[in-house]
Image (spheres, rainbow, N blue to C red):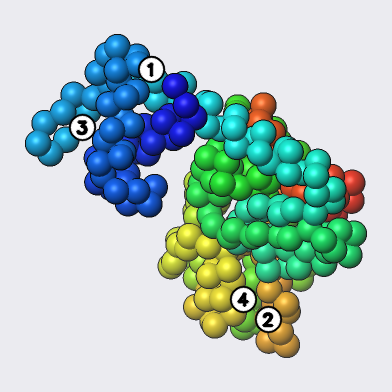
Amino acid sequence: MEIRQLTYFAAIVEEGNISKAAERLHLSQPPLTRQLQLLETELGCSLFERDTRHMVLTEAGELLYEKAREVIRQCGDIRREVADISSGRKGTAHIGVVSSVSSRLLPVWIMRFHSLYPNVRIDLTERDSYEILESVRNQKTDIAIVRRPFAGNDLDIFPLSIEPMCAVGKREMFEGLPDGRLSLKHLVGRPVIIYHRWENILKDEAALSPICRCEEAGTTAALSEAGLGIGIIPLSAVPCKSENTEVREIANSSLQSEICAVKLKGRYTPAAAELFLDMLCSQKLNQK
């Protein structure tokens, strides 16, 4: 049994048929079919139940797929670790960032990291929290910067900063409100734009009636600046303040947002990504 055969087998499982797997592997179908037959002959069992349109794993096939994925992951870790040792402080750091921290914090991080490690390449992915965390779990991303809450039993979590939520919008939207920090109750009856991650907390804290719910903090900020209503977003997601824009911190302690770095527990992290994580943890972000 060869690693190559396990890679071929895993591709067939994941693509659902030999034709698509061959396309993914840049092979023709006959040699791929032959390798599968050799693998089944060596193991002495069928790995798939076949008909004219589908290939379904047998019980033996399911076990082999689970083990094959582990072997393929380990081989990838070995290749990356050897490359790290040979290249020194070079390589690529694959970093995932949620959009709500990318506009103001990300440029500071990247510039600092580049000044410390100019030979390290940075590969950035910006998605929502769910997609970023899945990317970490699938080992397509080495380190992710996300906001709590999230399920993380399989992750190593490194808290970086706690920041308040803010109300942002055109100045006229805040007419009649007291100066300084606001309570959510002050916003009752006003047009409010919410960032979906805090929707349930906002409902619990005050009887707000949002006129718009957004999947991205940046969209919430843009709509509030355009005059649609008062956006409620984390402090670091607030865009550069313009002359006609009001930004007020929200006093409710339950609306504080914690920024964390995460990586997959028990897996090898490339040296370049570890350097990025070390930099973040050493400076312990403070946005107030």
Provide the residue designation for mark 1.
63
Q: Is residue 109 left or right of residue 146?
A: right
Dividing the image into 4 quarters, which one contains the C terminus?
Answer: bottom right
Provide the residue designation for mark 2.
245
Image location of residue 89, percent across then percent down = 84, 51
Taking the spot 62% from the left edge, 76% from the top edge, the residue there is 169
Image location of residue 225, percent across then percent down = 59, 79
Sequence order check, earlier mark of 3 and 2: 3
Mark closer to the observer (4, 1): 1
Sequence order check, earlier mark of 4 and 3: 3
Disc 2 + disc 4, Cβ < 8 Å:
yes
Provide the residue designation for mark 4.
169
Sequence order check, earlier mark of 2 and 1: 1
Image quadrant in which you'd find residue 121: bottom right
Sequence order check, earlier mark of 2 and 4: 4
Dividing the image into 4 quarters, which one contains the N terminus?
Answer: top left
- Give the CA separation, mark 1 to mark 3: 16 Å
- Give the CA separation, mark 2 to mark 1: 59 Å
Provide the residue designation for mark 3.
55
Residue situated furthest left in the rendering: 52
| Along the viewing direction, whichever of 162 and 255 lies nearer the viewer | 162
